[in-house]
Amino acid sequence: MKLFLKGDRCHTDKCAVERRNYAPGQHGQGRVKVSDYGTQLREKQRVKRTYGLLEKQFRAYFRKADGMKGVTGENLLVLLERRLDSVVYRMGFSSSRNEARTLVRQSHFLVNGRKVNVPSFLVRPGDVVELREKSRQVARVNEALDGVMRRGVPSWVELDRAAFKGTLKTLPVREEMTTPVFQEHLIVELYSK
């Protein structure tokens, strides 16, 4: 399944999933029967790899989502989308989440006028994320911003391309989260054991 980890390459015909849609190796095309636990584990691993998290970090987000009001699975995805590296990716400042994480770690972004270099920083509605003045000539950022029209900007994010800044208007809603589609109820079932 496409996780869109390779940036713009996943939007073209050169994507490995498009070219060879089976597991690698000699027995990759064989039929495999997967148990319920295997399905739940695969879904959890998919979400972890999409957002670039380790197990301990992911479990902490799950505990936090479980303690919030509302549906736990949706709360988990909202928390993951609110991370600074994910918001930078959604605004189009980078072509992949991994690249967004690198840009954040290198202190290229300001949140409400303050330098933030922690990818796990939770952005709140109304926060302004902008590219620092010195970083506006970075070639990768400008290329990503030029290609943002292909990928699109979600409705909960507002982007001002000319000023190199964006605003998180509201919290993301589950129906608006499009790529890739997760089955978060399987993750909740896995951790509820």
Image (spheres, rainbow, N blue to C red):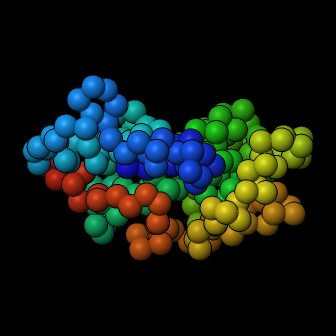
Q: Is residue 3 visible?
A: no
Q: In the rendered image, which quarter is residue 135 located in? A: top right
Q: Name the residue located 62 percent from the left edge and 71 percent from the top edge.
A: 169
Name the one closer to the observer, 60 or 166.
166
Where is residue 84 shown, x and y percent of the image? Answer: 59, 49
Which residue corresponds to the image point at 89% horizontal and 43% vertical from the top-left? 137
Is 18 rendered above or below residue 98?
below
Q: Is residue 163 left or right of residue 49?
A: right
Percent position of residue 151, x then y: 63, 61
Marks counted in the figure total 0
Q: Residue at x 83, y 41 (%)?
A: 139
Report whether 5 appears left or right of 108.
left
Query: At which x and y percent is residue 48?
Result: 38, 42
Q: Relative to 10, is 173 on the left or the right?
A: left
Image coordinates for residue 154, horizontal then vertical, percent: 59, 68
Judge from the rendering whether residue 60 lies leftward or rightward of residue 121; answer left or right: left
Residue appearing at x 31%, y 26% in the figure = 25
- Residue at the extreme top: 26
